[in-house]
Amino acid sequence: MTRTYIVEGMKNERAVRRIERALFRIDDISYEINFEQSTVIVFFSKMVDDDKVISAISRAGYRAMRL
C-alpha cells in the first residue's frame, strides 16, 4: 500500500536529508522523496497512521498533508 504526502518548504537536498532522518525512525515503511515535486511517497505493508508520518515530517521542520 502507498500514500502520498505534499510537503511545504521542501526545496533542496538539505530538506530531503532532514525528512529522511525523521522518516527513518518509523518502523515498517520505505519512502521516496521528490523535492522538485515537494512530495513524499510512503510504502508500507502494515497500516501506518497518517499522524505518525505527518508528525515525523513536522519534527523535521516541514508541514505535510496527505494527498
Image (cartoon, grey):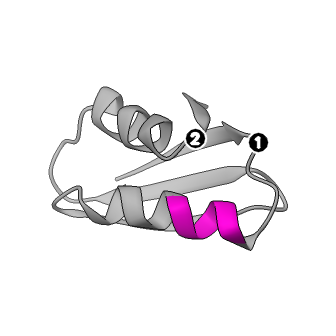
Give left or right: position of 7 versus 36.
left
Residue 40: image tag: none
Q: Residue 39, image x and y in percent?
A: 67, 51
- Tell me the crowding category of disc 2: few under 14, some 14 to 19, or many 20 or more residues within 10 angstroms, Cα based: many
In the rendered structure, which amino acid carries the disc numbered 1? Gly
Residue 11 horizontal side relative to residue 46, left or right: right
Question: What secondary structure is the stretch in magenta mostly built from?
Answer: helix
Give above or below for 4 relative to 36. Answer: above
Q: Position of residue 58 (x, y in %)?
A: 48, 35
- Give x and y (percent) for residue 64: 58, 33
Residue 21, how many percent across, how many down?
40, 65
* Residue drawn at the location 56% of the way across and 70% of the way down: 17
- Which image quadrant is residue 9 in? top right
Q: Secondary structure at mark 1?
A: loop
Q: Nearer the viewer, residue 5 or 26?
A: 26
Please say if the residues under marks 2 and 1 sit with CB atoms less than 8 Å apart. Answer: no
Identify the element where label 2 is drawn: strand
Q: Nearer the viewer, residue 61 or 34?
A: 61
Is 46 drawn above or below residue 20 in the view shown?
Answer: above
Boundaries of the magenta span: 14-18
**Residue denoted by label 2:** 5
Q: Is residue 63 above or below residue 4?
A: above
Residue at position x 20%, y 59% in the image: 45
State how far apart marks 2 and 1 are (Cα): 13 Å
Q: Horizontal placement of 11 versus 10: left or right?
A: right
**Quarter of the image that includes the C terminus:** top right
| Classed neighbour count for the residue bearing mark 1: other residues with Cα under 10 Å, few (<14), some (14–19), many (≥20) | few
Residue type indicated by callout 2: Tyr
Is 26 colored magenta in this rendering?
no
Residue bearing the label numbered 1: 9
Q: Specify the quadrant of the image occupied by residue 52.
A: top left
